[in-house]
Amino acid sequence: MHIRLRIVGFLLLTLSALWTVPAAADDYPNKPVRLVVPFPPGGGVDLYARSIQPELSKVLGQPVIIDNRAGASGMIGAEAVAKAAPDGYTLLVGNIAVYAMNPATYSKMSYDPLKDFTPVVQTVMVPYVLIVNPDLPVQTIPELLAYAKANPGKLTYGSSGSGSAQHLAAELFKSRTGADLVHVPYKGVGALVTDLIAGHIKVAFADQASMMPHVKAGKLRLIATAGLQRVPELPDVPTVVEAAKLPGFEISGWQGISGPAGMSPAIVKKLNEAINRVQSMPSIKSGFSAAGLTTVGGTPEEFTRYVQSEIVQWKKVAKDVNVVVD
C-alpha cells in the first residue's frame, strides 16, 4: 500500500509539473520585465535598451525597466543576471565585451557566457570608429602615427576598462602599426568621452553610436572607421584598412539579449518574437541607423553560434596582443 501511494504521489507531482510549465509560459509576462544593462548610461548598450524600451513594453503588455549595473567590464551586471531566477523577468542586454572579450582577456571569470545564460536574440551591430581630441594636430591616421612616433609615451588612449572592446581594438591597432600609445582605462564609456572631450586623453576607439553626437557637435574629431567597408552614413571617412594599409583590420561591436540558464523555451520564443518585432519597426530601425546601429535579429540558435565563434576569434586576438586582465 505504501509503495502504491508513493507511486501515485510521484505521478501526481510529475503531472503537476508538466501542467505548471505551459501555464507559466502562457501567462508570461504578468509583471514588469527588467533589462540589466551592465554599463553606465551613455554608451551604445544603454542607447539600444532605451530605444526599444517603450515599444517592447507595449508588445509585452508589461512595463520594461532598465537597470544599469556597471562595473568590471560588464561582469557585475552579467553575474547578477546569471544568478537570477530563470523566469524571463530578468534579462541581460550584453555586448561583445560581456559575451566574448571578457572570456578572452580575464584570467578569472564570475560567469560562463555559454553555460550561464539562455540566448534570446542577437540585436544590433555597432561599427567602431577612431576618434581624437580636436586639439590634437592630426587629421589622418598617417599623421597620428607620425605624431605618436615624434612624441613617444605622451599620446594616451582611453577605454571603458581593461579587457574591453576599446582596449583590445587599440592594442590590435598598436600591434599592427607600431604606434606608441599609452592606455588609460575608465569605468564606462561616459567617463571616457568626458575626458576625451576635455583633452585629458587624446585618442580612442569606440562605438559609433556613442561618439557621433560629439563629432557632429565639433567636440571630437573622426579619423577613420574600423569596419572592412566604409560606413554608409559616413561615405567620406576612410576605414583603418584603407588609411593605415592594414588588410583585414576590423572592429565591430555587437549586442545581444539573454537570460539566466534554464529558461523555458516557450518564454524564450515569446521574447525572441517580441524583440524581433520591435527591432523591425520602421521608426526603431531609422533611429538605429541614425545612431550607427544595424539591426541583426534572428533566432536564439543563431545567436549562440555567433557568440561561440566570437569567443574563439577574440581569444586569439588577446593572445596575439598579450592582453590579460587579472
Image (cartoon, grey):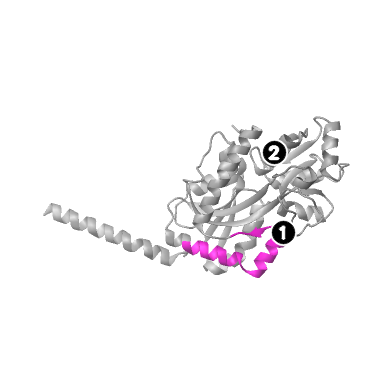
Q: Is residue 172 above or below residue 305?
A: above
Reading the chain from its start, which is encountered first: label 1 or label 2? Answer: 2
Decide which of 304, 3 is in the foreground and name it: 304
The residue to which callout 2 is attached is: 172
Residue 42 visible? The answer is no
Q: Residue at x 59, y 42 (%)?
A: 313
Q: What's the amino acid at mark 1? A: Ala
Q: Is 161 contained in the magenta span?
A: no
Circle number at residue 105: none
**Main SS category, magenta section:** helix
Quadrant in which the C terminus is drawn: top right
Residue 55 in the image: state x and y as whole percent: 60, 67
Kind of element beneath mark 2? helix
Q: What's the amino acid at mark 2? A: Leu
Which residue is most to the top? 152
Which image quarter: residue 64? bottom right
Q: Is residue 29 above or below residue 213?
A: below
Kind of element beneath mark 1? helix
Decide which of 100, 185 is in the foreground and name it: 100
Which residue is most to the left? 1
The residue range painted magenta reads 269-296
Q: Nearer the viewer, mark 1 or mark 2?
A: 2
Separation (CA) of disc 1 from disc 2: 25 Å
Q: Is 274 contained in the magenta span?
A: yes
Residue 312 in the image: state x and y as whole percent: 56, 42
Q: Residue at x 76, y 36 (%)?
A: 177
C-beta proximity under 8 Å, tags 1 and 2: no
The residue to which callout 1 is attached is: 291
Quadrant in which the N terminus is drawn: bottom left
Q: How many marks?
A: 2
Residue 28 in the image: state x and y as whole percent: 45, 64
